Amino acid sequence: MKLLFVSAVLFVASVVAQPLTDDQMKKAEGFALGCLDQYKGLNKEHLVLLRDGDFSKVDGETKCFLRCFLQQAKFMDESGKLQNDYAIERLSLSREKSKVEALVKKCSTGSEAADSCETAFRAVECYHREKASLL
């Protein structure tokens, strides 16, 4: 469980391409733990692969974990809609706003799916793939 939890937190840090402050780390830990409680069957190998940017073995359980995490972080609402304005606000705290806006727009366009778990996965995959644009 500890490896699973650490992998989840490290994955979140890698997605936003920045070190997390102590406060952000505490919040991320709380979100991850709450979501891990809901998805007890989550495969730790999948989270390790996600952390490393390998999305080849993502399954439905992993996608729904990502949805849970994004909802806890308020980047996605309960209905599964991405909250772009909030994502821009939060990610702009330590990054250039115009770059964050471009990233969020790019990653929200085409991410919407009928299934909210799939939407979360597509958005996270895009953020991970495009995070270099924030540097």
Image: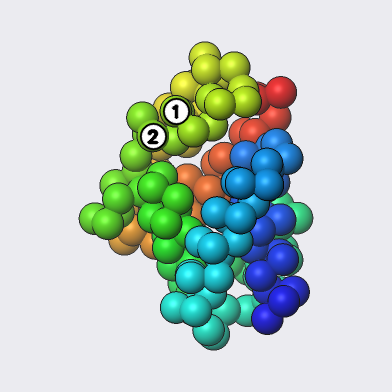
Quadrant where the N terminus sits is bottom right
Please determine whether, in this image, residue 130 is positioned above or below residue 7. above
Identify the residue at the far bottom of this view. 41
Residue 54 visible, this orientation: no
Q: Residue at x 42, y 56 (%)?
A: 72
Q: On the image, numbered disc 2 is attached to which residue?
A: 86
Identify the residue at the far front of this view. 23
User: Please, what is the three-letter code of the amino acid marked with disc 2?
Assistant: Tyr
Please state if 18 lies on the left or on the right of 88 as rendered: right
Closer to us: 52 or 40: 40
Callout 2 crowding tier (Cα within 10 Å): few <14, some 14–19, many ≥20: some
> Horizontal and vertical percent for residue 23?
61, 46
User: Please, what is the three-letter code of the amino acid marked with disc 1?
Assistant: Glu
Q: Residue at x 48, y 70 (%)?
A: 35
Please determine whether, in this image, residue 95 is positioned above or below residue 11. above
Residue 52 visible, this orientation: yes
Quadrant where the C terminus sits is top right
- The reply to whether discs 1 and 2 touch (Cβ–Cβ < 8 Å) is yes
Q: Which mark is residue 17?
A: none
Q: On the image, numbered disc 1 is attached to which residue?
A: 89
